[in-house]
Image (spheres, grey):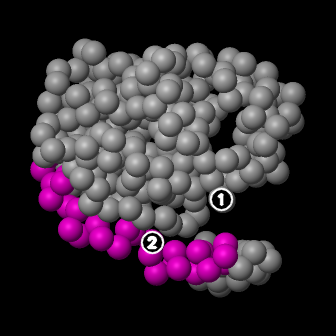
Amino acid sequence: MTFREKLSYEIGYMARLAKTPSRLAQYLASKFHTRIGSFGRLKPLYKEKKGLEIGGPSPIFGAKGYIPLYPLAKQIDGSNFSNNTVWENTIQEGMTYRTGDHAIGHQYILDAIDLAPIASASYDFILSSHSLEHIANPLKALKEWLRVLKPGGSITMILPDSRYTFDHKRPITRFEHLLEDYRNNTGEDDLTHLEEICALHDFTRDAGVKDQAGFRERSLHNIDNRCLHQHVYDLALLRRIFAYLELKVVLTDASFPHHLTIVGVKN
């Protein structure tokens, strides 16, 4: 794309956003915030260290991404719930996890709530980009992620800001509800929220589905595809979760187009 074409695109996009001033303000701010502002002080959390990414790889952590930490790490392994997913297509367990041209880590085929084959305190950091919202029992998952994290290690999570996604009509999930799911050992086959999701899902903002009937049919098989956003988060809820898990929050951030970021350190 030439400079003129890019400028024309930017102007047109800004004009469309001008109909919603808060969205335009967020977009303009992002032009000066293409990488997370405090990333410099976060580098020691990843530099020459070994990490595990849940549900990746994610361009957002790449060299040109919002949090460009892949190039810093010594090794990054990955975990996905299936060897065939909507996002990664067909993947194989073994030393097949790629986060760059030369970086290769171990690919696990494991559900996010059960990383049993991985020894406790195996990793210096945990990464998750747009994954936790797909998990029915997030506290169970997070406790498992923390089990494989070393003391002093960090967890970096990015979730969608529902205000700017197809979830914008849905209420933010209450922490008490997440705690109830954990105490009841809610399974990943849970469809408790399906009726709410179908009623409030904004199909005009979801390019991945054609109509409500198709969306509902796909959702009924969520245990196989994990496409549903089981819960809706904001930064206040994420801080509450980290406090419950006794994680020291070192950064929170909301950035264009729809990212909520929280980074915490395990005691």
The percent coordinates of residue 161 (x first, y second) are: 57, 56
Viewed as shown, does residue 76 lie left or right of 48? right
Which residue has dot 1 on it? 163
Q: Residue at x 55, y 42 (%)?
A: 174
Q: Residue drawn 38% across and 62% down?
A: 252
Q: Earlier in the sequence, mark 2 or mark 1?
A: 2
Q: Position of residue 223 (x, y in %)?
A: 59, 18
Give how far across and how far down residue 67 sits, in percent: 36, 60
> Relative to residue 173, is residue 71 depicted above or below?
below
Residue under label 2, please give it.
34
Kind of residue sitting beneath label 2: Thr
Residue 5 visible, this orientation = no
Q: Is residue 42 highlighted in magenta?
A: yes
Would you say 25 lies left or right of 80 here? right
> From the image, which quarter does the C terminus lie in?
top left
Q: Label 1 amino acid?
A: Arg
For the residue pair 98 and 46, the one nearer the viewer reads as 46
- At x 39%, y 28%, the residue is 141
Task: Measure the alpha-carbon separation of dots 2 and 1.
Answer: 20 Å
Q: Residue at x 21, y 29 (%)?
A: 148
Q: Is residue 231 visible?
A: yes
Q: Magenta segment: does it hold 240?
A: no
**Image-quadrant location for residue 138:** top left
Which range of residues does the magenta coloring cover? 22-49
